[in-house]
Amino acid sequence: MANWFSRAPRRIELPRLRSRNEELATKKVDLEEFAPGVLDFLGRSAYVQLTQFECLSRAISGAPSTAAKTAIGRVAEISLGRHRMLVDEIAKAGRNPAEVMEPSAADVDAFQRTTLSTDWFETVMSCYLTAGFLDDFFARLALGLPADVAKRIAGIFTGDSGEAVLADILQGAIEADPRLASRLAMWGRRLVGDTMLVARSSLRYSEDHTSDEARIEPVFTELIAAHTRRMDALGLTA
Amino acid sequence: MANWFSRAPRRIELPRLRSRNEELATKKVDLEEFAPGVLDFLGRSAYVQLTQFECLSRAISGAPSTAAKTAIGRVAEISLGRHRMLVDEIAKAGRNPAEVMEPSAADVDAFQRTTLSTDWFETVMSCYLTAGFLDDFFARLALGLPADVAKRIAGIFTGDSGEAVLADILQGAIEADPRLASRLAMWGRRLVGDTMLVARSSLRYSEDHTSDEARIEPVFTELIAAHTRRMDALGLTA
C-alpha cells in the first residue's frame, strides 16, 4: 500500500466502494427525458471533464509526497482519456470540439472556482466528490441520447475512474490527523450544493418546470445517496 | 486547424519538425557508457516526466481558449502515459516507484522552478523546449541500459510526444504578435542552460572527469542542435 504523507511505511485499508457500473445497473434510469441534444451533451460533459482534470492536476502539483503525485497521476490520465473520448465524439460528428465546448465554459468555470481551495486535502476532496457525482450524473443522462450513441457515450463515464485512489489518500489523511474529519465533512457538504447546480443546468427542461422538478427529484435523491456513500467511505457524515 | 487565441478562424501552418525517431536513427549514440543503473535511470526519468506533466497542466489551466486547453490536454495525456510506463517498469523490478523516484525530487523540483513563468506563452515554451531536450537525452541514455530493457525503455521516449501541438500554438502566437518573438527567444536561451544541467546530473561519471567531459561534449552539441531546430521551427534564433 502506498505511503502518501511521509517516508515511514504505514498500511491503509482500501475503502469498500461499489463500482459505478454496479450502481447504475441496479437502479432505474429516469433522467433520459431530460437529455439535451448529443452535441450539447458532449460539449458540456467534455468541458466538465476538462475541469475535473484541472482539479486533479492541482492536486498533483500540491501533493506532499512523490507517492501521492504519481498515484493521482493515474487518475488524471483516466480523466484526460475520458475528455479525449468525448472530444473525439464531437469531431466524429463533424464539429469543432472547442466551439462545441465553448458555451459551457463560463458557468462550468464558475463552478470550478467554488471547488478551489488553498488546502491540499480540500482540493483532493473536491476532485473525489465532484467527479464521483458528475460521472454518475452524465452516465445516467447519456442513456437518454439517441440509441446509436447512448450506450457508447454512457460507457465513457463508467468503469474505473481512479476514485479509490483519492478515497485512499483522504482516508489515510483523516486517520493520521482526525481533526481533518470535521473540516473535510464541512467542505464536502459545501461542494455537493454547487455540484448539483452544475448538473441541473445540464438538463433540458420542458415548459412545465414544476412537473419537471417533481420527476427530476428522485434521481437527485439517488445521486445524493451515492454522494453520502462516498462520504461514508471516508468515515464522514454527509 | 485549431484557433488558439480567439473565436475568429485562422489558419496556421504546422511547422515541419523531424520526428525524434528519425533523428535518433541517423546519429551515433554515445551516451551509453554514462548510463546509470536501471533503477536510477527509471527513478530520475519518471520524476522528470512527472514535472513535465506539471508544466503542461499549468499550460492547460492558464490557456486563453478552450481550443488550447483541449489540444494541450492530448500532450499532457501522452506525458502521463510515459510517466506511468516508467513507473510500471520500476514496479516490475519489484521496487516501490515513489521510493525510487524520491532521490531525484529535490534537484528536479529546483530545475522545474527555473522553468516557471507567470506568462502563459513562456510556460508553453518551457514545456516545448525542456520536454524536447530531455526526451532526446533520455532516449539516448536509455540505450546504455542492459540489453534486455534498453530498447523497450528508450522506446518510451520516442514516438509522438505531442510536440507539434505546442510548436503550433507558439508559432500562432508569434505570428499574431511579433513582439513576442524576442521575449520568447530570450526565454528559450535561458531554459537551455538549466535543462542541460539537469541532464548532465543524470549521468554516471567515471573518476576521470576531464576525459568524461570530452566524450560527453559531442552528444550535447547534437542535443543543442536539436534544440536550435526547435527554436527555428518557431522562427526564433537559439
Image (spheres, coloured by chain):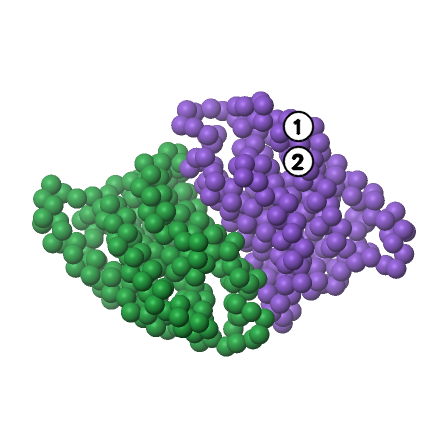
Chain colours: A purple, B green
Q: Is residue A114 left or right of residue A63?
A: right
Residue A160 coordinates in the image, percent (x, y): 59, 44
Res. B89 in view: no
- Are discs 1 and 2 less than 8 Å apart at CB? yes
| Chain for disc number 2 | A
**Depth check, front residue: B209 or A123:** A123
Residue linked to disc 1: A236
Residue linked to disc 2: A188
Q: Is residue B234 above or below residue A154?
A: below
- Residue at image position (34%, 49%) is B114
- Residue at image position (70%, 59%) is A41
Given the current orientation, which residue lies at the most extreme front position? B179
Determine crowd level at label 1: few under 14, some 14-19, many 20+ residues with C-alpha closer than 10 A.
Answer: some
Q: Which comes before the other along the chain, label 1 or label 2? A: 2
Residue B75 coordinates in the image, percent (x, y): 46, 58
Please tell me whether mark 1 sits on a helix, a strand or a loop: loop
Q: Quadrant of the C terminus of chain B?
A: bottom left
Residue B138 coordinates in the image, percent (x, y): 30, 52
Quarter-of-image position of residue A168: top right
Q: Is residue A43 left or right of residue B198?
A: right
Residue type at tag 2: Gly
Please tell me whether mark 2 sits on a helix, a strand or a loop: helix
Numbered marks: total? 2
Res. A137 in view: yes
**Depth check, front residue: B110 or B38:** B110
- Mark 1 and mark 2: Cα distance apart in space: 9 Å
Determine crowd level at label 2: few under 14, some 14-19, many 20+ residues with C-alpha closer than 10 A.
Answer: many
Q: Which mark is residue A28?
A: none
- Residue at image position (28%, 48%) is B198
Q: Is residue B218 left or right of residue A178?
A: left
**Depth check, front residue: A103 or A114:** A114
